[in-house]
Amino acid sequence: MDKYYKVIRADGKSPSAEFDYAPYLPNGGAPGKWLPEIPNPRKEGYYVSKYWNMWYADGMRIYEVEIRGEIFPDEQGAEKQVRCSQIRLLRDLTKSLLEKFFKSKTPDSAEGWNEGRGNSGLGNVGDSNTGNFNVGSRNTGNLNLGDFNTGDKNCGIDNVGDENSGSGNVGCNNEGHSNSGNSNSGSFNSGSYNKGNGNSGSFNFGSGNVGKWNVGNYNAGFFNTSSAPFMIFNKPSPKGVSFSDIKLPKFLNKPNPKEAFREASADDLKMVLSLPNFDFEIFEKITGISKSDFDKKLNGSASS
């Protein structure tokens, strides 16, 4: 079972808030009192972490905690802390944890401050980190949680930049995955300050926009406030049909659709034929699958 810890100041105060833990500290070998219950821990709760070394600073105290109720981890990226509705402080483990973790009382000995191999820096948990207080492996920078991050305070994997929450981001302050740019909230955005997915440009609110300051989906241009029709079989999509309404069978997700077509079911074929603006000539030109191919498959299915 995972152990969780709470790092607080020596005077009993929270390092980041005004809450006073002093009345709830362990006393005489006995656990402290349960802290007041917080009714909505999903949004606001007591923060505890398996990685006390991420939060420790000189002179602070490290307490093992017991948790009541459900726990809610970070929503994006790797877990650095969790929120919960109620905790109590079981015991002060500062001395034993520091002695075990640092293995040396001299900060000049960088190797003694790491748990793992091949680290260059201090306070790393993992292997081959360059920097300080990383949890994971092969990070370059500081305070990363995950693997292969280049920069500082990333939470996830393969980020290049600072303070990304997610994976595969290139830039800073992105929340999501595979963004290229800064301060995107969502995934697969190319640009900055987008809220949504798959935008190319900046300041878009929605998904699939190309340009800037669009509010809606699949717009190409600037300052649009609705969702644009998209092209399908060389014609605009019918009114009321959205991009998310288009469903393709599995054989059209293969690199060689004509070969995969041999295993397609009658339902797969009917799904294709029901696509808006479906055109046999265009479909054959792109996939190599002709109308006669459809007829043979459908007639064979009907007779079997």
Image (cartoon, rainbow, N blue to C red):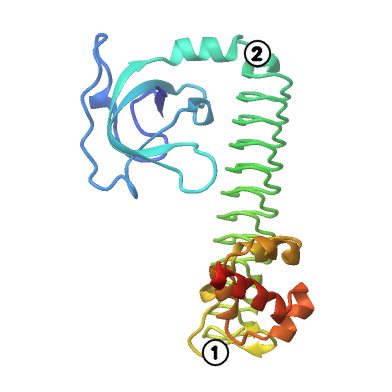
Residue type of the residue flagged with mark 2? Gly
Q: Can you tell which mark lies on residue 238?
A: 1
Find out whether the residues at labels 1 and 2 contact each other: C-beta distance under 8 Å.
no
What amino acid is found at the position of numbered circle 1 in the picture? Pro
Q: Nearer the viewer, residue 230 or 41?
A: 230
Return the residue nearer the eye: 81 or 231.
Answer: 231
Viewer-nearest of discs 1 and 2: 1
Q: Residue at x 74, y 67 (%)?
A: 258
Q: Is residue 243 above or below residue 147?
A: below
Compared across the picture, whether 15 is left or right of 113 comes to left
Classify residue 116 as left or right of residue 95.
Answer: right
Tell me the CA gap for discs 1 and 2. 66 Å
- Earlier-in-chain disc, 1 versus 2: 2
Residue 65 figure quarter:
top left
Res 204 seen here:
no
* Quarter of the image that includes the N terminus: top left
- Residue 201 image offset from top left, x and y in percent: 67, 72
Q: Nearest the camera: 27 or 169?
A: 169
Q: Residue at x 73, y 30 (%)?
A: 130
> How many residues crowd mark 2 within 10 Å: few (<14), some (14–19), many (20+)?
some
Q: What residue would you read off at disc 2?
A: 112
Taking the image as shown, residue 40 lies to the left or right of residue 101, namely: left
Q: Which mark is residue 128?
A: none
Q: Is residue 100 above or below residue 10?
A: above
Q: Position of residue 257 (x, y in %)?
A: 72, 65
Where residue 82 appears, as percent x and y from the top left, is 41, 38
Question: Which of these two is toward me, 19 or 209?
Answer: 209
**Where residue 275 appears, x then y in whole percent?**
58, 80
